[in-house]
Image: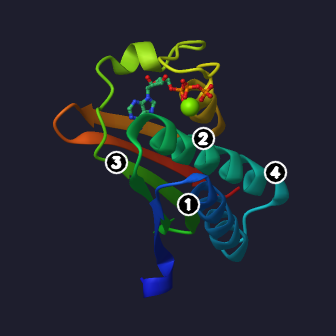
Amino acid sequence: MTPKDEIHVPINSDSDIVTARQQGRTMALEAGFGDTDLTVISTAISEVARNIVEHALSGEIILRIEHNGSKAGLVITARDDGPGIPDIALAMQDGYSTGKGLGLGLPGTKRLMDEFDIVSDPEIGTTVIMKKWRN
Ligand SMILES: Nc1ncnc2c1ncn2[C@@H]1O[C@H](COP(=O)(O)OP(=O)(O)OP(=O)(O)O)[C@@H](O)[C@H]1O
Ligand SMILES: [Mg+2]
């Protein structure tokens, strides 16, 4: 793995969300993802980065290309040290929001990606790990 295969984007503000989305799109383009996947990847990064800004204030997005045999995938990790999600099953339901959102960010993002996991703890914060495999 070359160093360029992994990028860390600090997330503190709305402009960082744009940066993370652009970096993810560039990385996915270089890895050969098609137009539909590029849009999906941009949307997914936006949602988890926006959740960091809105619900945890600050954190980071880590972007990495993973190879599994001839298969290439983009791994997106969103990590923060915010208040955590007390009930992940509830947070994953369509329409559940503790803020002013529609409560569609997490469940919608899960539907877009091939793999999706959340680990959260009030002492540690929240980590969302998701993958998109290239067709
Ligand atoms: N990183 C996070 N840290 C703490 N709580 C979070 C985090 N991400 C999501 N949550 C919690 O999970 C809920 C659901 O998240 P989701 O993204 O689905 O909806 P939302 O952000 O409220 O609205 P939107 O539809 O605009 O995304 C949030 O309202 C919040 O309570
Ligand atoms: Mg959200």
Task: Tell me the tag on residue 62.
Answer: none
Looking at the rendered structure, the kind of residue marked 1 is: Leu
Mark positioned earlier in the residue sequence (2 or 1): 2
> As drawn, which residue projects farthest toward the bottom?
2
Looking at the rendered structure, the kind of residue marked 4 is: Thr
Marks 2 and 4, how far apart at CA: 17 Å
Label 3 C-beta lies within 8 Å of the nearest ligand 1 atom: yes
In this view of the protein, which residue sits in the foreground, 72 or 13? Answer: 13
Marks 3 and 2, how far apart at CA: 14 Å
Mark positioned earlier in the residue sequence (3 or 2): 2
Tell me the crowding category of disc 4: few under 14, some 14 to 19, or many 20 or more residues within 10 angstroms, Cα based. few
Which residue in the structure is indicated by mark 4?
Answer: 36
> Is residue 52 shown above or below 133?
above
Report x, y in % for residue 74. Answer: 55, 60
Tell me the crowding category of disc 2: few under 14, some 14 to 19, or many 20 or more residues within 10 angstroms, Cα based. some
Q: Residue at x 49, y 44 (%)?
A: 53
Which residue in the structure is indicated by mark 1?
Answer: 74
Looking at the rendered structure, the kind of residue marked 3 is: Asp
Label 4 C-beta lies within 8 Å of the nearest ligand 1 atom: no
Label 1 C-beta lies within 8 Å of the nearest ligand 1 atom: no
Which residue in the structure is indicated by mark 2?
Answer: 47
Tell me the crowding category of disc 3: few under 14, some 14 to 19, or many 20 or more residues within 10 angstroms, Cα based. many
Label 2 C-beta lies within 8 Å of the nearest ligand 2 atom: yes
